[in-house]
């Protein structure tokens, strides 16, 4: 029997990914939504999460898709009401917020699932297995897209806590964290802030592991033309390209894992996998919260050299 789940925050990512993933999951049934401005046809709608929790005690699971700046308050409401909770990435505006949610979930004995959809990309298992028995010499991340194409009019991304270019850039970091066999730390960052915005539009990062592996990342929201979401790994026994956000794996020129089937998208697989994992966690009473991606982004803001670039307008 499918588990009732409520979706909170009906924006672009909820409509494009969460709604179809829930519909196709088999494990969940979309029983209600909570959003100020939107809903889903044929599904009970509430203006906010507080009203939903009060009137629908029969819904055990909440999937939260609101912007990170306002997510903590709703996350606390859901956990305090004893509901299992799935968080869209990033899991919060600060590390402190997420630590608080972990403690609340533990205290109430409910599941907390802080998702990073890129960790569920198609080629991740094969890339992780291939890297496990090799010495990595260098990693180059090229993550460049057009903000006007992928996030049209989403002003919250430019407000403090909205992460700016790290909203997509954290996907690259979470993907790297999923495949790299050793712990990562940030050693240098340069962040480009538009003169009229409070979050960066581009970032250059340098990271390392315990072996001193050189890792560089170029993340940019100003890319026009072909969009790029690639990680190149150079090892002592061959080189690999993890392309298209983790959908494809090419090793020494041979494609090992192909991209999505015609008509599908990379995210279709990732969000289906997220809901499958959420169902597993709820069934076993476990939680899953990986904080490395958010920690590395926070470190970039802590030690990053800030440079001012031309103003950004939609």
Image: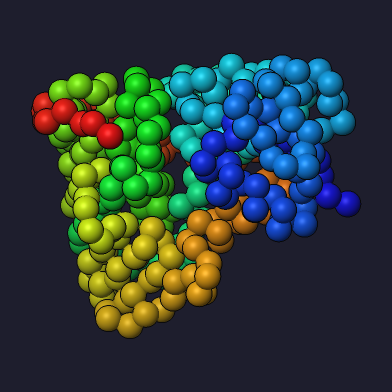
Q: Nearer the viewer, residue 109 or 175?
A: 175
Image point 34% across, 47% down: which residue? 149
In the depicted view, which residue is nearer to us: 226 or 102?
Answer: 226
Residue drawn 62% across the image and 32% down it: 38
Colour treatment of the image = rainbow
Query: Where on the picture, by quarter, is residue 240?
Result: bottom left
Which quadrant of the view contains residue 128? Answer: bottom left
Residue toward you, 179 or 64: 64
Residue 93: x %, y % from top left: 44, 24
Is 123 rendered above or below residue 14? below
Is residue 168 visible in the rendered image? The answer is yes
Q: Residue at x 55, y 20 (%)?
A: 72
Q: Is residue 34 above or below residue 293?
A: above
Position of 197 with respect to 172 (left or right) is left
Q: Is residue 129 above or below residue 91?
A: below
Q: Residue at x 33, y 83 (%)?
A: 254
Q: Residue 164: x and y, percent?
A: 31, 32
* Left or right: 313 as drawn, with respect to 15: left
Q: Where is residue 18 drawn, in percent x and y?
A: 61, 46
* Residue 305 coordinates in the image, percent (x, y): 13, 27
């Amino acid at each position: 029997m499918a588990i009732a789940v409520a979706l909170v925050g009906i924006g672009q990512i909820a409509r494009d990914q969460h709604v179809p993933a829930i519909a196709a999951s088999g494990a969940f049934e979309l029983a209600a939504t909570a959003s100020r401005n939107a809903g889903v046809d044929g599904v009970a709608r509430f203006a906010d999460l507080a009203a939903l929790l009060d009137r629908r005690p029969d819904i055990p699971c909440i999937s939260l898709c609101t912007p990170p700046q306002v997510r903590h308050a709703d996350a606390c409401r859901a956990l305090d009401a004893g509901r299992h909770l799935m968080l869209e990435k990033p899991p919060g505006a600060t590390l402190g917020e997420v630590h608080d949610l972990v403690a609340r979930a533990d205290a109430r004995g409910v599941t907390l699932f802080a998702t990073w959809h890129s960790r569920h990309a198609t080629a991740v298992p094969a890339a992780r297995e291939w890297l496990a028995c090799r010495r990595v010499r260098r990693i180059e991340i090229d993550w460049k897209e057009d903000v006007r194409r992928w996030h049209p009019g989403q002003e919250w991304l430019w407000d403090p806590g909205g992460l700016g270019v790290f909203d997509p850039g954290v996907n690259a970091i979470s993907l790297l964290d999923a495949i790299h066999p050793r712990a990562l730390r940030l050693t240098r960052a340069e962040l480009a802030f538009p003169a009229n915005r409070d979050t960066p539009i581009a970032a250059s990062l340098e990271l390392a592991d315990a072996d001193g592996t050189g890792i560089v990342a170029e993340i940019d929201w100003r890319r026009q033309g072909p969009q790029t979401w690639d990680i190149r790994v150079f090892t002592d026994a061959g080189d690999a390209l993890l392309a298209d956000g983790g959908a494809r794996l090419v090793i020494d020129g041979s494609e090992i894992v192909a991209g999505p089937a015609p008509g599908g998208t990379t995210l279709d697989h990732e969000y289906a996998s997220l809901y499958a994992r959420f169902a597993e966690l709820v069934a076993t009473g476990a939680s899953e919260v990986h904080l490395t991606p958010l920690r590395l982004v926070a470190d970039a803001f802590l030690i990053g050299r800030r440079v001012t670039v031309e103003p950004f307008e939609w």
